[in-house]
Amino acid sequence: MRLAVVIPCFNEERNLWRLHERLSEVLPGIADEFEVLLVDDGSTDRTLAILRELTESDPRFRYLSLSRNFGKESAMLAGLSAAEGDAVAILDADMQHPPELLGSMAELLKQGYQQVVARRTRTGEPRLRTFGTRMFYRLINRLVEVDVPDGFGDFRLLSRPAVDALLNLREYNRFSKGLFSWIGFDTAVVDYENVQREGGASSWTFRKLLDYGIDGVVSFNNKPLRLAIYVGAVCALLAFGYAGWVLISALVQANPVPGYVTIICGVVGFGGLQLLVMGVIGEYLGRIYFETKRRPHYLVKEASGLRPATAPAFERAPQRAVQRTVK
């Protein structure tokens, strides 16, 4: 089995040499032939400089450097598009994904599975983040048409047919957890204990996690639009019911019609609801807008063995041409 390992990198200067050391120890025992493809996602530290040194010292390691920070989804797509091999693994550069697990994952792949997912526990994770993450998975599994189990991340080993299936999904707004589940194929799971980051700080702030959660809910289904219809219908019925009650009360019991407070509460409440529904519709329209532009997911400014001025944009290039160019 020829194994390729794709690793998105963003400001990982503290971890790259240690990552190289561990992968150099682990991978020779897993596959006779392997390559490691590191994707620099517009880092602002010395990540790119270290990648140049690392790939010059070890030809089994290659790199791509994107022209700016396009996000982890685009970096993973860039790596998968350029990776060669019968199987492709996806790891994080901070070593929270233990490379040692790849051995047992490769054995499951040889047994006929097309995807092998490493599922981590949440030991040592902040309680607030654990609570928010579990609520996110409960919500998204109620909304999307595929199952996205809690603990399933990007750390996985894919067969070549699974990788090709992912590359055929060309939508601009990508939610990899949903895409991994959508393509199907026989999937095996390997559990492991949560590992703390060895160096540097995570770039995933609470706001980025919240935005990622919204992207997952909106990008992979249209149920929020249907929910807006239901909520609007319920609110309209309540409004008509309340109006009828006020009218009957005024005619039968001669009660005064509620005044200023009732009007203000109604205007503010229904106005906020309208803005919420318009926001949901706007999210879908925005995604349609970006899809129709058909811009590339990423641009490559530099790659192993190529000068920055000649490094091509691999997006939308044929797979074979990409592989020849990156070598």
Image (cartoon, rainbow, N blue to C red):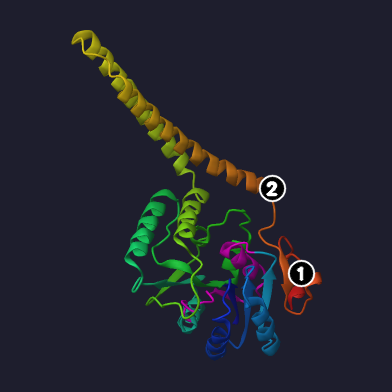
Which of the pair 253/318 is nearer the observer? Answer: 253
Residue 148, x across and y down, in percent: 43, 59
Residue hosting label 2? 293
Assess whether mark 2 and mark 1 are in contact (beta carbons under 8 angstroms): no
Residue 321 tag number: 1
Residue 220, x across and y down, in percent: 51, 51
Between the C-alphas of marks 1 and 2, the distance is 24 Å
Horizontal side of 208 relative to 240 (left or right) equals right
Residue 52, x across and y down, in percent: 69, 81
- Residue 36, visible in the rendered structure: yes
Q: Give the class, few, some or many, for how many residues have Cα within 10 Å of label 1's Cα (few <14, many ≥20).
A: few
| Image height of 177 relative to 230, above or below | below
Amino acid at circle 1:
Ala
Which of the pair 164/25 is nearer the observer? Answer: 25
| Label 1 element class | helix
Q: Which residues are magenta?
A: 69-98
| Image height of 282 relative to 53, above or below | above
Quarter-of-image position of residue 239? top left
Queried whether the magenta region covers residue 85, the answer comes back as: yes
Residue visible at 74% across and 78% down? 327
- Residue 85, visible in the rendered structure: no
Amino acid at circle 2:
Lys
